[in-house]
Amino acid sequence: MNAAQIAPLAVVLPLLGAALAFVLIRHPNAQRRTGATTLTVTLALEVVMLASAWANGAQAVNIGGWIPPFGITMVVDELSALMLVVSSAVSLAVLLYASGQGMADSDEEGPVSIFHPTYLILVAGVSNAFLTGDLFNLYVGFEMLLTASYVLMTLGGTSPRIRAGVTYVVVSVISSMLFLVSIAMIYAATGTINMADLAIKLGELEPSTQMTLHLMLLVAFGIKAAVFPLSFWLPDSYPTAPAPVTAVFAGLLTKVGVYALIRTETLLFPGDRLNTFLMVVAVLTMLVGILGAVAQIDIKRMLSFTLVSHIGYMVFGLAMSSVVGLGAAVYYVAHHITVQTSLFLVAGLIERRGGTTNMDRLGGLAKLSPLLAILFFVPAMNLAGIPPFSGFLGKIGLVQGGVDLGTPVAWVLVAGSMITSLLTLLALARVWNRVFWRRPEDAEHPDPVLVATKPDGSAVRTTRHVEERPHGRFTGRGIVQLLPMPMVWPTIGLVAMGLALTVFAGPLFDLSDQAAREMLQRTPYIEAVLGEGAMQGAGQ
C-alpha cells in the first residue's frame, strides 16, 4: 500500500472538521465531539502512514495528477510521518483539555464557536507543513497555522493578550515575508520550487548564489523555530495565552520551524558549509535560553525560556550532519513536543488549583494536590534529562554524536549541552521546592486563600475572580478551584506518552536513525518524487 495516497486526508479531515464545527456554532457539545472525532480519525490514518513509511521508505503523491515539479506534491517519509503522529496525538490531548476547561468555566476563557474551528485549522496547517514537497505549499502551511494562532492567542481580548499578540503577529509577518521573498528568488534562480527538483538544481548554481539563498531560508526558519538571537519574541508572547493555547504553541509551532530547518538543510543544502555556524547558534540558544529560565519567578515564563533553550539541542543534532547526531535530534524533537506540552498543561492546572503561576505566591501544592505534584514531577525530570527518561536518552545520543565528531566546536557544544541540562534541572527543582514542597505561609507573598485551604478542598469556593496587578507580576490570582477531571485525564495521557517514549526508545531510535540515514543520502526522497534515476542529474 502506498501510504502517500491517504496523506492529503491529514490536511483535508481537519479542514472539514473545522467547517462542521463552525456550522455547529450553537451546539457546544457537538462541536467538542466533532473536534475530538476528527483528530482521532486523523491520528489513526497517520499511524498507518508511519508504519508504511517505516517499512517502505519515502513515498509521494501528486495532488491532481500533476507531474512534478509542476504540481503540489506530498511526501511521506519516516520524519514527516513521525512528526504527524506525535503532533496529532498532542493536539488531541490539548483539545480534550481545552474542552474540559471550557465545560468547567462555562466557556469564559473563549467562545467555543471560535476556538474549535480555529484549532482544527491550525492542526491542518501543521500537517500540511510536515507533508508538503514544495516550498510554496510549505509557506501556505505556515500561513494557515499562523493565521489560526493569531486568533487563538488573543482569545478573551485582555490587554496582555492583545499586546503579546501584536508582537507575535509582527514577528510572524516579518519571517513570512522573508520566506516568501526567498521563494521568489529561488524560483528566479532555478525555475522550480519543488524541493526534490531543487535538491538537484540548486547544486548547479554559483556558490555565492547558493549561500545567499541558504542564509535567507535559514533566517526565515530560524525566526519561526525561535533560535538565538531570533527568539526574543517567544517568552513575552506564549505565556499570556490561555493554558491549552500556550501548550499547543509550545509543543508544535516552533517544531514546525525546526522541521523546516531539518528538511531544507539536509535536502536542499547538503554538506557542512554552515555547520560550524549552526553549532555556535545551538550553544548560544541553549545557554541564553536556560539562563533566562533560571531568572524567572513565573512558571509559564520559565517554561517558555526552557522551550527556547532546548531548541538548541535540535539544532545541535542537525549541525553534526551525521546519522547519530541527526537521528538523536529527530528523537529529541518527538520527546520535546510531548514533554514540553505536558508541562504547560500542568502549569494550567497549577494556575487553576493555586490561583496563579507566580512562584512567590505559591506553596504546599504537593499536600494540597498530590496528583498534580506527580503530574509535574515526571515530565519535569524528563525534560531535565534524568535517567532513564527519554530526555536523558535523547541527550546521550546528541552527546555521542558530538564526541564522535571530535572537533573543538563539537566539544564546546557537548559541554554546553551538559551545563544546560544541569541548569534545566535547577530551574525545575526551584519550581518543585517553592510551589510544591514548602508550606504556603513560607511564600514571599503568601496567599491567604491558599494558606487557609484544606487538602480536601473544603472552605474553598468554586467561583473565580481574576485580579490584574501592575506589570503582570501577580496576575492570575483567583479563588482556589478543584481540578476538573476532564482537564486532568488528557494531562495524564500526555505524561504517559512521554513515558512511552522511554519504554519504546529502542524502536523509536531505530526509526530516527533510519530517517536520518535517508535524509543524509537524499536519494530516497528525490526518487520518491521524481522517479528512479533522478539523482543521476544531481551529479552525485
Image (cartoon, helix red, strand yellow):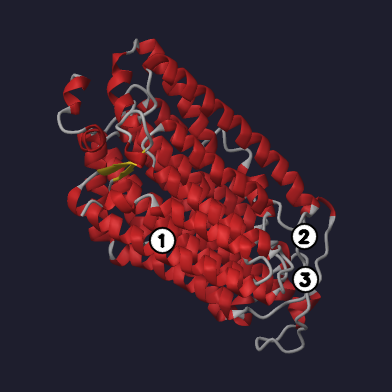
Looking at the image, which is closer to me, 65 or 412?
65
Three-letter amino acid code at disc 2? Thr
* Disc 1 from disc 3: Cα separation: 37 Å
33 over 3 or under it: above or below: below
- Number of the label disc, if any, that sits on residue 475: 2
Q: Considering the numbered disc 2 on the image, is that residue within a helix, a strand or a loop?
A: loop
Three-letter amino acid code at disc 1? Thr
Residue in view at x 45 percent, y 36 percent: 137
Badge 3: how crowded within 10 Å, few (<14), some, or many (20+)?
A: many
Residue 443 quadrant: bottom right
Q: Quadrant of the N terminus?
A: bottom left
117 over 64 or under it: above or below: below
Q: Which residue is mark 3?
A: 478
539 over 415 or under it: above or below: above
Looking at the image, which is closer to me, 257 or 424?
257
Three-letter amino acid code at disc 3? Gly
Left or right of 388? Residue 140 is: right
Q: Considering the numbered disc 1 on the image, is that residue within a helix, a strand or a loop?
A: helix
Q: Which residue is mark 1?
A: 42
Left or right of 63? Residue 158 is: right
Measured from the top left, where is residue 224 in percent x and y?
53, 38
Measured from the top left, where is residue 493 in percent x and y?
45, 71
Are the two marked residues, 2 and 1, in contact with CB atoms closer than 8 angstroms? no
Q: Considering the numbered disc 3 on the image, is that residue within a helix, a strand or a loop?
A: loop
Residue in view at x 54 percent, y 79 percent: 371
375 over 369 or under it: above or below: above
Residue 146 quadrant: top right
Residue in view at x 23 percent, y 51 percent: 2
